[in-house]
Image (cartoon, rainbow, N blue to C red):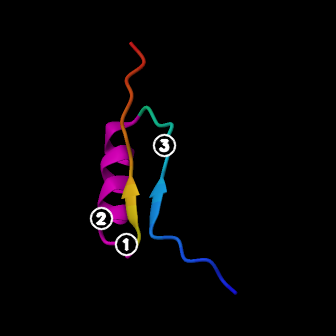
Amino acid sequence: MTESIDFIKILLVEDNEGDIRLAREALAGSKVRNELPQYCNS
């Protein structure tokens, strides 16, 4: 029996805003619901 995954949390460690935007755009088109919170190290 295979288990279905319908929601995932993703921790993306990235300092480049362009790469963060690219990751968000790529995930927006996925069939899996996801959460990609953004944290700031300042």
Q: Residues within 10 Å of mark 2 (few under 14, many from 20)?
A: few
Q: Which residue is mark 2?
A: 28
Q: Are marks 2 and 3 in contact (CB under 8 Å)?
A: no
Snapshot quadrant of residue 2: bottom right
Task: Pick the quarter of the image with the C terminus.
Answer: top left
Q: Are marks 1 and 2 in contact (CB under 8 Å)?
A: yes
Q: Going by the picture, which residue comes out furthest to the bottom?
A: 1
Q: Please name whichever residue, 29 or 17, is drawn nearer the observer in this view of the structure.
A: 29
Mark 3 vs mark 1: which is more N-terminal? 3
What's under tag 2, amino acid-wise? Answer: Ala
Q: Going by the picture, which residue comes out furthest to the front?
A: 1
Q: Residue at x 41, y 70 (%)?
A: 32
What's under tag 3, amino acid-wise? Answer: Leu
> Distance of mark 1 from mark 2, alpha carbons?
6 Å
> Distance of mark 2 from mark 3, alpha carbons?
15 Å
Residue 30 is situated, as x and y percent measured from the top left of the image, at: 37, 72
Q: Residue at x 30, y 64 (%)?
A: 28
Q: Which residue is mark 3?
A: 12
Mark 2 vs mark 3: which is more N-terminal? 3
Image side of residue 32 versus residue 28, left or right:
right
- SS type, badge 3: loop
What's under tag 1, amino acid-wise? Answer: Ser
> Distance of mark 3 from mark 1, alpha carbons?
16 Å
Q: Residues within 10 Å of mark 3 (few under 14, many from 20)?
A: some
Q: Is residue 20 magenta?
A: yes
Q: Which residue is mark 1?
A: 30
Image side of residue 11 versus residue 40, left or right:
right
Q: Residue at x 45, y 70 (%)?
A: 6
Residue 9 is situated, as x and y percent measured from the top left of the image, at: 47, 51
Residue 27 lies, with reference to residue 36, above or below; the image says below
- SS type, badge 1: loop
Q: Main secondary structure of the magenta part?
A: helix
